[in-house]
Image (tube, rainbow, N blue to C red):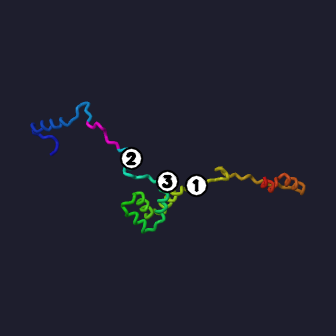
Amino acid sequence: MGGLSRDPKKRSNQLANLKKGMAKKGDVLNPKGRPRNTIRTMIKEFEDAGLVVPSNEEMGKMYLYIATLNEEELKKLLNDKELPMMTRIIARGILSKKGLDVVDKIVNRAYGSQQHIDITTNGKDLQPEPMKLIFVANKEELEKIENEIPNTEEKEGK
């Protein structure tokens, strides 16, 4: 079963048939080459079919609308095979055990993730000035030191 026959006559016919189908040196069996299914051709096919890529703003709105639906409405979305897969995937994610994570990702997608910006130190660590303790023995020394310390009211006015 399968392979070449043991009968010499049949075997020579089989070998002749095999040689007919073999390429000769220099022959090109597939002149057009392998059909290319590149991203560009897929995009062209999608555009020719009338599909449109939603903007970031439209995607953000869609995410938020889906996130505001109740459970029954989400189940309807999930089971509607006419809707885009993205919509159904989001609905499935919200209904899953990881629903809170999915909603968090949806909100981050729509509004962007929170960024903490330090506007006071430009990202540098705060290094408080060391406290200086000065002991004075009398009132004259105290007045002399008080005069050396800048007035806080003057600082605020500048």
Q: Quadrant of residue 156?
A: bottom right
Q: Is residue 101 visible?
A: no
* Count of numbered circles on the image: 3
Left or right, 1 with respect to 114, comes to left
Q: What amino acid is labelled 3 in the image?
A: Asn
The answer to which quarter of the image holds residue 94 is bottom left
Magenta residues, start to end: 29-36
Residue assigned mark 3: 56
Mark 3 or mark 1, earlier in chain: 3
The kind of residue on which mark 2 rests is Lys
Between the residue at mark 2 and the residue at mark 3, the CA separation in whole angstroms equals: 21 Å
- Reply yes or no: does residue 33 show up in magenta: yes
Q: Separation of disc 3 and disc 1 at Cα?
A: 19 Å
In front of the other: 133 or 72: 72
Q: Badge 3: how crowded within 10 Å, few (<14), some, or many (20+)?
A: few
Q: Is residue 132 above or below residue 26?
A: below
According to the image, label 2 marks what residue?
44
Given residues 31 and 89, the one toward you in this image is: 31
Secondary element at tag 1: loop
- Circles 2 and 3: CB atoms closer than 8 Å: no
* Residue that mark 1 sits on: 115
Say if the magenta span includes residue 104: no
Q: Which one is earlier in the sequence, the residue at label 1 or at label 2? A: 2
> Mark 3–mark 1 contact, CB under 8 Å?
no
Where does the image place residue 72, in percent across and percent down from the top left? Answer: 42, 69
The residue depicted at 45 percent of the width and 54 percent of the height is 54
Give the label, 1 or 2, closer to the camera: 2
Which SS class for mark 2? helix
Question: Which residue type does callout 1 highlight?
Answer: Gln
